[in-house]
Image (tube, rainbow, N blue to C red):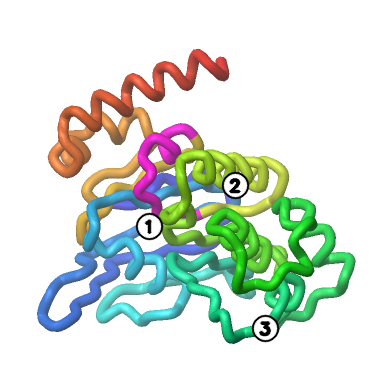
Amino acid sequence: MSAAVDSQQVLLEAQDICVTRQGKCILDSVAIRIGAHDFITIIGPNGAGKSMLLKCLVGFHQPDRGRISRQPGLRIGYVPQHMVPDPALPITVRRFLTLRKRADEESVRRIAQETHIDGILDTPFAVLSGGELQRTLLARSLLDDPQLLVLDEPAQNLDISGQLSFYRLLERLYEQRSLGILMVSHDLHMVMASTQQVVCLYHHVCCSGEPHAVTQDPEFISLFGHDMAKMMAVYQHSHSHEHG
């Protein structure tokens, strides 16, 4: 099963992706397509294979079986799940942004303003707060003007205020830039409010579609429970009134 894509340009498509590690099936016949202005979020329990799927899609890992096709010359910006700044690495945020990247000062300034890190460019990278670190990683991923932005649990270590701030920033980027977004997240209440499509993964694609439809799918309910499904339905109803 794959996420639906309209007639727009397809950035990346994967079919029959299978990965096995130490005799254990991590991904089983997974298929997904990402269009030029899709916002797709992959959800699922811990150990479902979500991060492995992202790493296969961006080329960090080769699947044991299956085919992944990317638009020729596709520019991908990647925000990793974990990064712990090394206190022994004496660099500023400004220097970190341009490590192994060709970016002029004007580009750095513009991206820093866009991601709200312009006030910390000369701050040591190792002392950033969780929210500052995530915005800095996001800023670095945008320096190459990506066509596809891939994020692996970007708000995992943030408090609720930090999560809200980060997802609002992500929504603005999606609205203002010409890019597609593919994200893994556990923050179901945030996901259901911001994303266009949800892919529910548990080694295989259990269900996919618009958020309101996915929360009613028996596969979603079997993974997350009736209480979560009801809570998401109430949240979406409230959210539509708030912004309708």
Whether residue 7 is visible, yes or no, is no
82 relative to 113 in the view: left or right = left
- The tag earlier along the polypeptide, 2 or 1, is 1
**Label 3 crowd (10 A; few <14 / some 14-19 / many >=20):** few
Q: Any mark on residue 196, and which?
A: none
Residue drawn at (14%, 83%) of the image: 22
Rendered location of residue 81, percent (x, y):
43, 65
Asked whether disc 2 touches disc 3, contact meaning CB atoms under 8 Å apart, the reply is no
Residues at marks 1 and 3, CA–CA distance in whole angstroms: 41 Å
Which amino acid type is marked by label 3? Pro
**Label 1 crowd (10 A; few <14 / some 14-19 / many >=20):** many
**Label 2 crowd (10 A; few <14 / some 14-19 / many >=20):** some
Q: Which residue is mark 1?
A: 32
Residue 125 in magenta? no
Element on which disc 2 rests: helix
Asked whether disc 1 touches disc 3, contact meaning CB atoms under 8 Å apart, the reply is no
Element on which disc 1 rests: strand
Residues at marks 2 and 3, CA–CA distance in whole angstroms: 29 Å
Q: Which residues are magenta?
A: 182-193
Which amino acid type is marked by label 1? Ile
Examine the image and state in which quarter residue 125 appears: bottom right
Q: Nearer the viewer, residue 117 or 77?
A: 117
Residue sitting farthest toward the left = 23
Element on which disc 3 rests: loop
Q: Which residue is mark 3?
A: 90
Residue drawn at (45%, 78%) of the image: 59
Rendered location of residue 39, percent (x, y):
51, 46
Name the mark nearer the viewer: 2 or 3.
3
Q: Which residue is mark 2?
A: 170
Q: Quadrant of the C terminus?
A: top right
Which amino acid type is marked by label 2? Leu
